[in-house]
Image: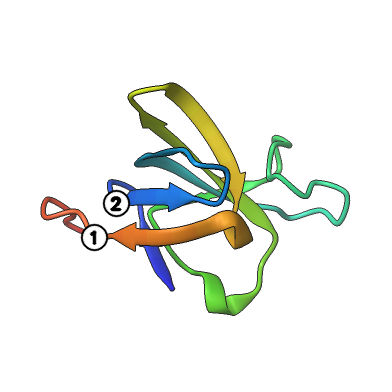
Amino acid sequence: MIINVGDYVECNHGRSGTIINIGIATEKTDIAAENDTALNAKTYDTELGYTGAITYTGDSGTHWCYFNQINKVEESATNEI
């Protein structure tokens, strides 16, 4: 599935919101792409299989989840990538 900053996501822990960051890990031990060496992307195809996570914001605050925890993506009508 292709995800973009600005897309609306529903994750497997019952939270949802708009993606504000896509992080891709560059080190084996950085499974959530939190290290300073992690890369930030505007778009990403999860079928590539990289390790990382998204940060998203919604009614219940700002949260993050791994790529494999995303259940549903709704493309933003305002994405200009």
Is 54 on the left-hand or right-hand side of 6? right
* Residue occupying the point 70% across, 60% down: 51
Is 27 on the left-hand or right-hand side of 15? right
In the current view of this chain or complex, which residue is farthest to the front?
A: 14
Q: Amino acid at mark 2?
A: Asp
Q: Position of residue 73 (x, y in %)?
A: 35, 60
* Residue occupying the point 69% across, 35% down: 36
Label 1 crowd bin: few (<14), some (14–19), many (20+), radius 10 Å: some
Q: Which residue is mark 1?
A: 75
* Residue occupying the point 45% across, 41% down: 21
Is 11 on the left-hand or right-hand side of 36? left
In the current view of this chain or complex, which residue is farthest to the top?
A: 61
User: Measured along the vertical axis of the image, is residue 37 above or below residue 62?
Assistant: below
In the current view of this chain or complex, which residue is farthest to the right?
A: 29
Q: CA distance from mark 2 to mark 1?
A: 5 Å
Is 53 in front, or is 28? Answer: 53
Q: Which residue is mark 2?
A: 7
Give the structural element (helix, strand or loop) at label 1: loop
Looking at the image, tell me whether mark 2 or mark 1 is earlier in sequence order. 2
